[in-house]
Amino acid sequence: MSTLEIKDLHVSVATEDGPKEILKGVDLTLESGKTHAIMGPNGSGKSTLAYAIAGHPKYEVTGGSVTLDGEDVLAMTVDERARAGLFLAMQYPVEVPGVSMANFLRSAATAIRGEAPKLRTWVKEVKGAMSDLDIDPSFAERSVNEGFSGGEKKRHEVLQLALLNPKFAILDETDSGLDVDALRVVSEGVNRYRASGETGVLLITHYTRILNHIKPDVVHVFAGGRVVESGGPELADELEKNGYVRFTQAGASA
């Protein structure tokens, strides 16, 4: 079992007017075998949390700690965090012209596993994972995300998740831009990943629709740069019914 522990995390981002504090003391503990959903309004800091954990240089950690199985995540470079078992599925996956999906995926797997996967078994593994996600085999020769639709980009993120099998997956609004069919396929991919029970998911979303497909064990409400309330799946139902007003008021007054 693995544990990702976030304690009193403060994060700032550079603006024209100087540093602006976005995260104002986040406390969160994730355990393998569980899915945690973070829900909150725009600007509450959800994506900032994801990028800070992953090591995005735009976000400066000014206080607190992030540890993975007791190891200091904040002291690691971005690639070290990935090798340690952290994965970020981005809200807006970037295009990488000139790098084929096939080369990208095998290079990533080699870096994570510590050795290049045997070609014959790797090809079979990739084809199987692409089939599970309804990705056309021809996409393997296309440049990473170049000319992909929003749904195709999100399927590619989950394809990476399936092949790299990290300890913890941070999914930053993976449901945004997906139609009903793509949402189902992507959700099934996430559920296959977490079915082993040895992995954990931090699912960031605005809406409850993805939670109808990926059932959370814990729901956290994010407002004003911190977690203001945590509960079971019923908390998401309350948000769907009543919105965030009660929680944004709590975040503002905290």
Image: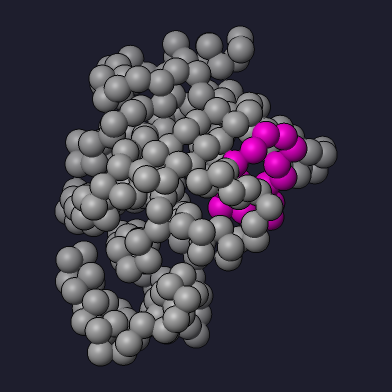
For residue 66, what is the image quadrant? top right
Quarter of the figure with the C terminus? top right
> Please, is residue 158 above or below residue 244 in the view?
below
| In the image: residue 215, left or right of residue 100 | left
Q: Position of residue 14 (x, y in %)?
A: 75, 44
Q: Residue at x 24, y 52 (%)?
A: 196
Q: Residue at x 32, y 38 (%)?
A: 35
Q: Residue at x 21, y 82 (%)?
A: 124
Provide the residue span drawn in magenta: 51-66
Quarter of the figure with the N terminus? top left
Q: Position of residue 167 (x, y in %)?
A: 40, 53
| In the image: residue 48, left or right of residue 243 | right
| In the image: residue 40, left or right of residue 178 | right
* Visible residue check, residue 152: no
Q: Is 166 in front, or is 21? A: 166
Q: Residue at x 44, y 18 (%)?
A: 229
Q: Position of residue 160 (x, y in %)?
A: 36, 66
> Please, is residue 173 above or below residue 181 in the view?
above
Color theme of the render:
one colour
For residue 253, what is the image quadrant? top right
Q: Is 129 in front, or is 164? A: 164
